[in-house]
Image (cartoon, helix red, strand yellow):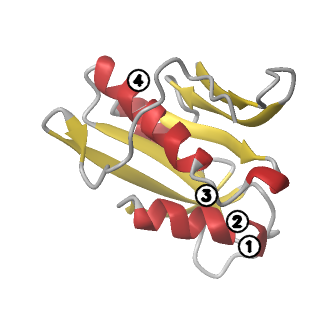
Amino acid sequence: MADAKCSSPSGDTVIAYGHLDLQPPYPPFAERRIPAISDLVVAEHARRRGLATRLISSFQDMARERACAEIGVGVGLYKDYGAAQRLYAKLSYIPDGRSITCRETPVDPGASYRVDDDLVLQSVFRRSGDRFAGSKTRPLNNLELPF
């Protein structure tokens, strides 16, 4: 797993972080060796400053360095994930077409599931050339932001 974080100007407080899981638990990603972004969090007071986008860009760079053509993410379905849903769509992540998952397993039509952090839509982002398709962000240099 590779990590990235953004720190406060003093460097003593982490204001955003995330992970790139190189062996993701979602079987279709694992089978195709697609690394997956997980646990990307930005402190509420630091949102709407582009930190999540820059972290995602750094994960895309990490995936490119490992010769991965795609990068994945699973995003929750309820309102707390609204900003993340919009951000990944804006950055050209598209659903992988295998269904909504609950604990990494596709849900069954007609079955009931608790709407919580385990119920997610899996999406992928495809690299084009030496950049990921749709990526227009500047990467983090050393994964530490003096913000």
Q: Are marks 2 and 4 in contact (CB under 8 Å)?
A: no
Numbered badge on residue 81: 2
Answer with left or right where residue 143 lies relative to residue 114: left
* Secondary structure at numbered mark 2: helix
Distance, label 1 to label 2, CA atoms, is 6 Å
Q: Give the labeled residue for mark 1.
A: 78
Q: CA distance from mark 3 to mark 1?
A: 9 Å
Determine whether the residue tagged by mark 4 lies in a helix, strand or loop: helix
| Quadrant where the N terminus is found in the figure | top right
Query: Whole-Å distance between the Cαs marked 4 and 1?
Result: 29 Å
Where residue 51 appears, as percent x and y from the top left, is 61, 45
The residue under label 3 is 75
Q: Nearer the viewer, residue 20 or 114?
A: 20
User: Which residue does the numbered mark 4 point to in the structure image?
Assistant: 62
Image quadrant for the C terminus?
A: top right
- Lateral position of residue 88 relative to residue 80, left or right: left
